[in-house]
Every structure is written in C-alpha cells, then in structure tokens.
Amino acid sequence: MGSDLQSRVRLRPVDLAREHGLSTQAVRNYEEAGILPAARRTPHGYRTYTSLHAGALRAFLALLPGHGHQRATSIMRALNEGAAEEAFRLIDESHAQLLDDRRTLQAVENALVDLEATTAPEHGAGSEPAAVTGPGGTFIGPLAAKLGIRPATLRKWEGAGLVHPRRDARTGYRVYDDADVRDARLAHQLRRGGYLLEQIAPLIAQVRAAGGLEPLEAALCDWRGRLSARGRAMLTGAAELDAYLRERG
C-alpha cells in the first residue's frame, strides 16, 4: 500500500479543492475527519495528496445527496480505517430508510384514496346525512360509530395530537369540525395500515399545514420526487464509491 501511494501522482490540497469548488481548508478538514486517507507530508510539512485522495473526495461528495453528511462521513471513515463491513452496513441502513420512507408515502397515498372513497358519498345525491349532533360539528359518540372505533380511541388520538376537537361552551362535550373528522378518518386509515401514532402525527400535521387534502397532493408529489432523487443519488454515490474501492485495492 505504501509503495502504491508513492507511485501515484502527487497533488496539492488546492488541486483537490479546485475540482469541486472547495476551499483548501475544507479539504484539510475532510482529511482530519477521516473522510480522506491521511496525507503524506513534505520535509517542510506540506500535505501531498494522490489520485487515491481525489477518488475518496469524489466518493464522499457523491454520497452526500443520498446518505447525508453524517452517514457519508461515517461510511468513508469506516473504509479508510479498514472496516469495510461497517461501511456496507451503513449503506444498507440508508437503503432500508429509503424503502421505509417509500412505504410511508405509499401508505399516505393509499389512505388518501380510501379517505376520498369513504367521504365522496356524503356529498352525493341521496347520501346519508353527516352525523352532526351539535351546532357546527360532530360529537365523539357519532364520530366513533361512523369510524367503527371506540370513543376512547378518539380520546387517545387527541392526546397524541392527531385531532383537536373544541369543547362545547354549554356542555363541555368534544365537538369535531370538518377538519377534525378528516384527520380522524386519515388517522384511522393509517392505523389500519399498521402505523403507530407517533408516525401518524407528523403526517396529520402536513395535512393541516397544507390546508386540506387537495394541497397535500402537491406535497406528496414533491415528496415522491425527493425520494426518487435520493434513490438516484445513491446509485451515483455507489458508482464513485466502487471506483474508490477498486483503486484502494
């Protein structure tokens, strides 16, 4: 390995930096972080790099979009320390996370389809009237019956932040407005899909932030695009990493 390093063309920090529009300090920082193999020093103490270091830098920068800074750093550090299996495990974790994110997206999309299917008849001719038992909203009993769940489940969802019913000023009863009913139905579909309350809460928050289901379609499209970009970036990172591994020998 030592003779291989000596036989490679020597590069200065600025040579590595220029290729990627980085500062020489960034290159030095990457070396200190273990992202690059340790550089040799001239008799005057200057760092000298080789094509191996250039390959490590290209691999790291290619890994960033798909794996993130922290994991990309850990992958490169593991490889440079001779712990290839640990690096592969970290890569596998990123792919597993991407798959999990895809399944979450699919679950949300399926839940929205089911939600539209269950709510559409309520707006059609001859449909059954909504179960409204109080002014401007639905009480907990009728809503629970409509969803086929217990009132205690709705109270649990409220505690988890999935629904936010107001209290009737006169009776103190919970009153669920249209947005609460929508959120409860969406939560119900996701729970049926096996998702935990803590996984559902941020998705419900997205629906609220989007102002309903229609604006959420654009958010889901963006989400889908970002997942695809991440998957593509992982392929690019894998190619550069493979090139680096082959050069390491």
Image: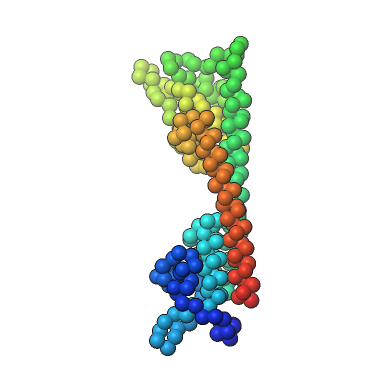
State the quadrant of the N terminus: bottom right
Q: Which of the two residues, 174 or 247, is positioned nearer the viewer here? A: 247
Where does the image place residue 180, in percent across and percent down from the top left?
47, 27
Where does the image place residue 130, in percent across and percent down from the top left?
53, 16
- The chosen color scheme is rainbow
* Residue 31 at least partly seen: no
In this image, 42 relative to 189: left or right?
A: left
The single residue placed furthest to the left in the displayed view is 169
Q: Which of the two residues, 41 or 170, is positioned nearer the viewer here? A: 41
At a point 58% along the width and 32% down the height, the residue shown is 112
Please say if 84 is above or below 204: below
The single residue placed furthest to the top in the displayed view is 126
* Residue 143 at least partly seen: yes
Q: Which of the two residues, 226 or 121, is positioned nearer the viewer here? A: 226
Please say if 112 is above or below 224: above
At a point 61% along the width and 30% down the height, the residue shown is 113
At a point 51% along the width and 80% down the height, the residue shown is 10
Location of residue 94 (image quadrant):
bottom right
In this image, 31 relative to 224: left or right?
A: left
Where does the image place residue 219, in percent across and percent down from the top left?
51, 38
Where does the image place residue 162, in percent across and percent down from the top left?
47, 34
Please say if 171 is above or below 73: above
Total numbered badges shown on the rendered structure: 0
In this image, 129 relative to 47: left or right?
A: right
Q: Which of the two residues, 243 or 203, is positioned nearer the viewer here? A: 243
At a point 38% along the width and 18% down the height, the residue shown is 171
State the quadrant of the C terminus: bottom right
